[in-house]
Image (cartoon, helix red, strand yellow):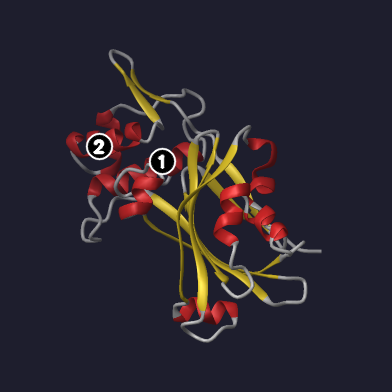
Amino acid sequence: MAGTKMVERQSGVALWRQIADRMRLAINNGDFDETGMMPPEVALASRFGVNRHTVRSAMAALAEEGIVRPIQGIGTRIERRDTLHFPISRRTRFSQGLGHQARDIEGKLLEAAEEPAPAIVAQGLGLATGTPCIRLEIVSSADKRPISRSTSYFPAERFAGMAEAYERTRSITASFRDLGLADYVRRSTEISAIHAEGDDMRQLKLSPGAIILVTVAVNTDLAGTPVQFSRTRFAADRVRLTVEAED
């Protein structure tokens, strides 16, 4: 972990969480590919300027995520460093985006409701605040590993059967097709990063302090009319977002 920064003691984020985040990033960057093992606790404690107990808590969090595994008498082995690449382009699709990287891609509908559009959703969809929309809460997995959780809104007048269509197809693209929309494109995507909390942490099976990448996106039909507003949270240690240039 060349160039590792010291932890920030006044940041409001627990020291072990900061260390877990930095070790997770180092693993994803391939910093330990030569050995396949994490450095000893004493070396990590010295590197970050903390005690071994703090490092041990960070290691425990990574072990709970399945990223590392302690082996008695040997050390801590890196179990998983594979990161999926998810392209964001004019035609962003979850299944197609993961392509050959996963054998089994699955979407699970957690909740569906018709409700008034919040102001930010109404603005994205070009509707008046409070206009009825269909909201879907979905967890998407690749090879049984949770990758993302999304909250999507669709204008209820046009897509009243979206929840039922998704239950049948397990695909937003296929659901749109069933409801008469043959094709759609991405108009905008905003990307940020935050610490996972609450239900996102539970549904994505993350430890406290794990980082998630957040995309806020609007899709439109080919005539430019907004059809979907979504806020998607990706597990940062499992997915790398790539913004592709358009022709």
Q: Quadrant of the N terminus?
A: top left
Using the numbered discs, state the Cα–Cα distance from disc 2 to disc 1 in whole angstroms.
13 Å
- 10 Å crowding of disc 2: few (<14), some (14-19), many (20+): many
Q: Tell me, yes or no, if residue 4 can be seen here.
A: no
Q: Is residue 221 visible?
A: yes
Of residues 234 and 247, the one drawn nearer to the viewer in this rendering: 234
Residue at x 73% of width, y 64% of height: 180
Query: Disc 2 residue type?
Result: Val
In the rendered structure, which amino acid carries the disc numbered 1? Arg
Residue drawn at the location 20% of the way across and 34% of the way down = 52
Residue 21 coordinates in the image, percent (x, y): 36, 46
Residue 71 vs residue 145, the one in the foreground = 145
The image shows residue 32 at horizontal and vertical percentages of: 47, 30
Label 1 residue SS? helix
Nearer-N-terminus badge (2/1): 1
Quadrant into which the C terminus falls? bottom right
x%, y% of residue 63?
33, 31
The residue located at (70%, 57%) in the rendering is 178
Q: State the image coordinates of residue 131 (x, y, percent, origin top left).
A: 51, 81
Q: Which mark is residue 45?
A: none
Residue highlighted by disc 2? 55
Quarter assignment of residue 175: bottom right
